[in-house]
Amino acid sequence: MTTGLHVRDLVTEFHSREGVKRALHGISFDVGANEIVGVVGESGSGKSTVVRSVVKLLMPPGRVMEGTAEFNGQDLIRMPERQIRPIRGKEIGFVAQNPFSALNPVVRIEKQFSNIAKAHGLKADAASRGRALELLASSGVNDPDRVMRGYAHELSGGMAQRVVIAMALYLNPRLVIADEPTTALDLTVQRQVLDTLTRLTKGSDRSMLIVTHDLGVVANYCDRVLVMYRGRIVEQGPVAEVFVRPQDPYTVSLLNSVVQPKAAADSPVPGPDDTTLPTELSESRSI
Ligand SMILES: Nc1ncnc2c1ncn2[C@@H]1O[C@H](COP(=O)(O)OP(=O)(O)OP(=O)(O)O)[C@@H](O)[C@H]1O
């Protein structure tokens, strides 16, 4: 059985009265064991459609027309909803853009954790409560006990997303998929939340597929990057290679959009063995 996620020839379309819009034109990539893979590209390039197609959380009128997404030897695309539901949460943790859409406003956070456990046939006991508290604390929630007893509306956006991250990791999934997990947050907390998410993923025998506008996040945390343009992956590879010696003209313009001309001129031109990332990319920069 192959570990990780293996996506092949994914074609996704949106069908409406106005016609058919093909959003993905045959996408193929892998997320290996313990790997963090970033997905970048301008708005509308298809980043969210890729991750939502893979975990079957694509909203109508979106439809996967062709392709496979093999995870632990099984094709997620062909799976009926009742078969994929137990995989989502237990084996694949999903972190969406807006934390409040993932939290139930009328159920205490504590109960939402125990509901996750029960939905997967696990006991909601003191040990699982302890694990939730631990995860909340390591996600940067200051008073986990108080948060557990409260409701989502009592939380700031940053705290709510930390709670969602703790929930996504609660059942110890091997793969975490995050769709621009900080878009809805204030700039000041975006980086902290991304730090938390990647820290909890790295070194824990997990892999992650993360959509982000922040090329600094990719430079700092990702092993590999997929560059998307108009529904296609125009370039993919190790971050150090793609960011230092981009091959595709779109990747070049994407990188130029964050690397200021003056800074670029001051930097040494990378030679064949120089895989140092441009310093501009080790800071938080958005596209
Ligand atoms: N409900 C929909 N109906 C029709 N077309 C859609 C729908 N949702 C997305 N699309 C189209 O699919 C393409 C990919 O959209 P997607 O949201 O995946 O891009 P994205 O790269 O994630 O953008 P962003 O960074 O703005 O979230 C776009 O051209 C978009 O217009």
Image: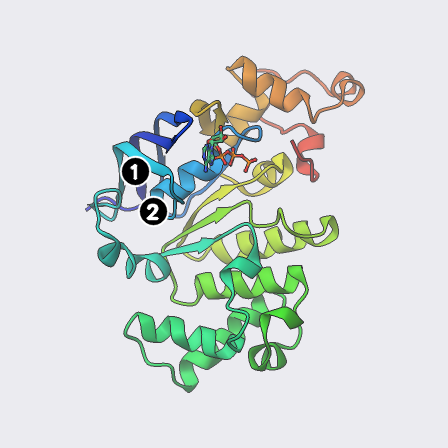
Q: According to the image, label 2 marks what residue? A: 56
Name which residue lies at 38% across and 42% down.
60
Name which residue lies at 22% across and 51% down.
80
Name which residue lies at 59% across and 17% down.
252
Residue 101, placed above or below residue 233: below
Q: Nearer the viewer, mark 1 or mark 2?
A: 2
- Spatial CA distance of label 1 from label 2 is 15 Å
On the image, the x and y values in percent for residue 67 come to: 26, 32
Q: In the image as oriented, which residue stretches furthest toward the front?
A: 17
Is disc 1's CB within 8 Å of ligand 1?
no
Describe residue 219's horizontal placement relative to residue 187 as left or right. left
Disc 1 element:
strand
On the image, the x and y values in percent for residue 273 come to: 55, 20
Which mark, by number, is residue 6? 1
Quarter in which the C terminus is drawn:
top right
Question: Hey, what amino acid is under mark 1?
Answer: His
Describe residue 272's horizontal placement relative to residue 206 as left or right. right
Going from the N terminus, do you reach mark 1 or mark 2 first?
A: 1
Residue 48, placed above or below residue 264: below
Which mark, by number, is residue 172? none
- Residue 281 visible: yes
* Most foreground residue, 283 or 150: 150
Q: In the image as oriented, which residue stretches furthest toward the bottom?
A: 126
Question: Hey, what amino acid is under mark 2?
Answer: Lys
On the image, the x and y values in percent for residue 17 come to: 39, 30
Which image quadrant is residue 196 in? bottom right
